[in-house]
Amino acid sequence: MGDGDEYYKQVLVDSGVEVLGWKSKDEVKDLLEKSKIYLSTSLWEGLPVSPIESMIAGAVPVLSDCSGNKDLISNGINGFTFEAAQKAVDHIVRLIDNEELFNSISFEAEGTSKNRYSIERYQNQITDIMGV
């Protein structure tokens, strides 16, 4: 999902990747709920919202090893990070070939996203801070 440089989009298409372009919030939610693995090749992230959304939907994140992503992922526990493209491929193949590994990491990813980034967690923290 998303968009980018025409040359690189064509490289992806030529490699068999479907480039979806920009989607509405509802379309993104629907696509994430159908996804098993979320791949991000970002060079930098602040708070990586899209990976968090994918984790809430139960997808296993495979993310570039950049700031933001490193803060979100405990490698091999709730997702994977990678520095080289081949390592991303290796992680994805392992997840496809090992259902038990996939299920374990998916469970942890969903738990991480809900425990650290849910509205309820924020409300509880604010309530505790305010002493209400």
Image (tube, grey):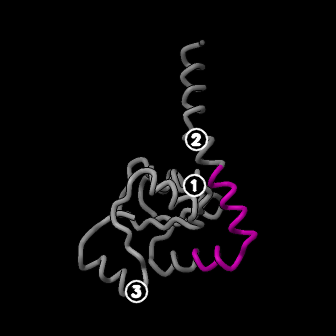
- Which numbered disc covers residue 55? 1
Q: Amino acid at mark 1?
A: Met
Question: In the image, is residue 86 above or below residue 40?
Answer: below
Mark 2 Cα shell of 10 Å, populated few (<14), some (14-19), many (≥20): few
Q: Secondary structure at mark 3?
A: loop
Q: Are marks 3 and 2 in contact (CB under 8 Å)?
A: no
Q: How many numbered badges does the structure rendering display? A: 3
Give the class, few, some or many, for how many residues have Cα within 10 Å of label 3's Cα (few <14, many ≥20).
few
Residue at image coords 63%, 52%: 110
Magenta segment range? 92-110
First reached walking from the N terminus: tag 3 or tag 2: 3
Residue 104 percent location from the top left of the image: 72, 62
Residue occupying the point 56% across, 67% down: 37
Residue farthest to the right?
100
- Residue of label 2: 116
Whichever of callouts 3 and 1 sits on the residue coming sooner in the sequence is: 3
Q: Residue under label 3, please give it.
A: 15
Residue furthest left in the image? 6
Amino acid type assigned to the residue bearing label 3 in the image: Ser
Q: Earlier in the sequence, mark 2 or mark 1?
A: 1
Q: CA distance from mark 2 to mark 1?
A: 11 Å
Residue 117 spot, x, y in % from top left: 54, 41
Front-lying residue, 75 or 117: 117
Secondary structure found at label 1: helix
Quarter the C terminus occupies = top right
Question: Is 95 placed above or below 27 here?
Answer: below
x, y percent for residue 67:
42, 55
Question: Percent from the top left, x then y, of residue 54?
Answer: 53, 56
Instruction: Tell whether 91 sits left or right of 70.
Output: right
Question: What is the quadrant of the N terminus in the image?
Answer: bottom left
